[in-house]
Image (tube, helix red, strand yellow):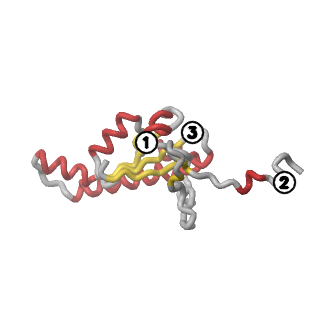
Amino acid sequence: VSVLGTDQNVTAHVTKWNVNADGIRQGYKGRNRNQQDIDLFDVTVTETLEELHENGEDAVSLDPETLEYYKQEHDYVFVDFYASWCSHCRALAPTWETLAEVMVDAGVEHQKQHPEDYTEEDYEAAEKVQMPVIIAKVDCVDHQELCNQQERIAAYPTLRLFVDG
C-alpha cells in the first residue's frame, strides 16, 4: 500500500482546472475533444522544407513588433507558433510553407486580374484584398516572451487566426 492508501497510479486520474487569483475555477480553454477531423500535416505535400525554400520563403517570420504590425495592417493573419525542437512542428513545416505559397500565388493571380490603375486610397484597399490571408510563423524558442506572456501559447505547434487585429 502506498502512502496515499492505494497501489494505483493516482496521476492517471488527475483532473486539472484553471484557477484564478481568488481560487475560483475557470473554464478550460484548451483543445476541442469533439473535433476528430484534424490531421497534423497534409500527406500530399511531398517536398521537403528545403525544397520549398529554394525559391524563397513564403511564410512570413514574425517577431513581437512585426506581429503587431501585421495584425493592424491586414484583416486576416494566420500564425504558426512553433518551437524548432518540436517534432510535430517540423512535420507541419512543409504543409505550412505550401499553404503560404498557395496564398502568395492567389494574391499574384488576383493582382494579374486587375491591372487597372488605382488611386492611392484604392490601391491600399486593393493591396489588402490581394493577400486575403497572411500566412506567418513565430519561433517561440527565439521569442519566448511573445509566446508565453503575450499570446499564452501552451503547446506546439499552435495555429492561431487573427481577425481584424
The residue to which callout 2 is attached is 6
The residue to which callout 1 is attached is 57
Question: What percent of the width, then of the height, locates residue 120?
Answer: 12, 45
Q: Secondary structure at mark 2?
A: loop
At 82% from the left and 55% from the top, the residue drawn is 8
Q: Which mark is residue 163?
A: none
- Classify 10 Å Cα crowding around label 1: few (below 14), some (14-19), many (20 and above): some
Depth check: 128 or 142 in front? 142
Mark 1 or 2: in front is: 2
Mark toward the start of the polypeptide (1 vs 2): 2
Question: What percent of the width, then of the height, locates residue 163?
Answer: 33, 53
Q: Secondary structure at mark 1?
A: loop
At 31% from the left and 39% from the top, the residue drawn is 69
At 40% from the left and 53% from the top, the residue drawn is 161
Mark toward the start of the polypeptide (3 vs 2): 2
Can residue 42 be seen in this snapshot?
Answer: yes
Question: What percent of the width, then of the height, locates residue 10?
Answer: 76, 52
Q: Work out how far the residue at label 3 is from the one at label 2, CA to CA, in angstroms.
A: 41 Å
Mark 3 residue type: Ser
When the figure is inspected, residue 159 is found, relative to residue 145, above or below; the finding is below
At 31% from the left and 55% from the top, the residue drawn is 132
* Horizontal side of residue 165 vs 1, given as left or right: left
Occupied quadrant, residue 86: top right
Depth check: 77 or 24 in front? 24
The residue to which callout 3 is attached is 84
Q: Work out how far the residue at label 1 is from the one at label 2, CA to CA, in angstroms.
A: 55 Å
Mark toward the start of the polypeptide (3 vs 1): 1
Q: Secondary structure at mark 3?
A: loop
Mark 1 residue type: Glu
- Classify 10 Å Cα crowding around label 2: few (below 14), some (14-19), many (20 and above): few
Question: What percent of the width, then of the height, locates residue 95?
Answer: 51, 53
